[in-house]
Amino acid sequence: MTVGQNENAALEALIIGTSPATCRLREMIRRVARSNASVMLCGPSGSGKELVARAIHDEGARAGKAFSAINCGAIPGELIESELFGHEKGSFTGAHARRIGHFEATEGGTLFLDEIGDMRFDMQVKLLRVLEDRTIVRVGSSDVKAVDVRVISATHQDLGAAIADGKFREDLFFRLGVVVLQVPSLANRVEDIPALIRHFQRQMPADAKCRFDDAAMALLMQHAWPGNVRELRNFVERASVLHGGETLGLDDVAMLLNPTAALAPGRAVPSSPAAVPASAEDVAAVAPHAKTPAPGRPIDLKREIETIELEQIHVALDLADGIISEAARLLTLKRTTLIEKMRKYGVHQQAA
């Protein structure tokens, strides 16, 4: 096998699939990897943008250097500057020692800034200055330090709308997006689903792997996949836990694709056009678990609603792999509203 074939095999092992959309994506990765230009990855949550950033790094001249990823939405606004540029001891409350930021720690390598659209406006100005001057200043210091770092950023937001609303700097967008690369949704590469399932099952014990009959696989390829590849990975894990070693049919997959139906049988919405709505018999089978007012004993409606709300929050966070912005989208809530509800119920989540 030649060097070129080795490189192709490595990229195909990282970016899995043979669909036209995936083949185009791999070709774009090879092209942008040859340069040091800043790249912005656009695409829906869960589509694998960090994996694409890693592939660009591995295919380029910086492959032997550090690769660092930071989620701009997961870090409190007051700490993002320290995370990126570092700080000196005593520069703010809690700064008990000098800290090296991601730019310094990734010297010579690639820094991946995920969810760049969530970055505070004042931090956007500071990041723009770093990208233009290729220098940083630690918080609490006046020393200017040169850095050599390739920046790849990513967002699932419409930055054009954010720029129009004055929430994102246009000059920073052009600096970050010298090359803008679209990462396809899973719905645009459904031909890759069988290969992706095999990939996710590869590390599983034989008795945990599920098989899917033709009708089940057809349903998987018709599903909308709002959570994209992340949702598929969670689906495969859920199937292995509940049906390890079994061959699943249409009904099994329909139930696994819509796990919230059992929590709210009267309100569950099919997650894809192919999903079959619950029958009257199905609803009746679940209904006895719901509380009904007993004679002379009122029901605590507020508490019951809170219980259902808490259950749905946990389910959404699980489906979103802990990413709060994605869970909020699944729940049709604003991100800040979901955070307030999580704080109310004592739900702790590290990712954003």
Image: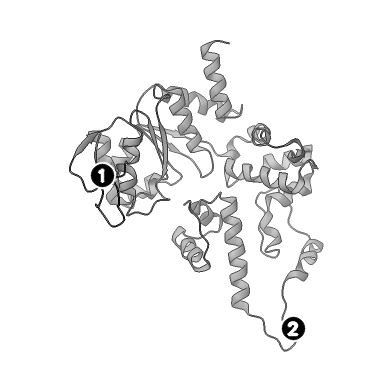
* Residue at horizontal 69 percent and vertical 37 percent from the top: 204
Protein image colouring? one colour
Q: Are marks 1 and 2 in contact (CB under 8 Å)?
A: no
Q: Which mark is residue 294?
A: 2
Q: Where is residue 105 shown, x and y percent of the image?
A: 35, 36
Residue 160 position within the rendered picture, expressed as x and y whole percent measured from the top left = 37, 45
Q: Residues within 10 Å of mark 1 (few under 14, many from 20)?
A: some
Identity, as a three-letter code, of the amino acid under mark 1: Lys
The one nearer the camera, 48 or 214, is 48
Which of 81 and 90 lies nearest the eye of the viewer?
90
What count of labels does the image hold? 2
Residue that badge 1 annotates: 126
Please tell me which residue lies in front, 233 or 272. 233
Residue at 59% x, 39% y is: 186
- Badge 1 marks a residue whose secondary structure is helix
Residue 215, picture quadrant = top right
Quadrant in the picture for the N terminus? top right
The residue sitting at the bottom extreme is 296
Q: Position of residue 262 (x, y in %)?
A: 71, 60
Assign a secondary structure to mark 2: loop
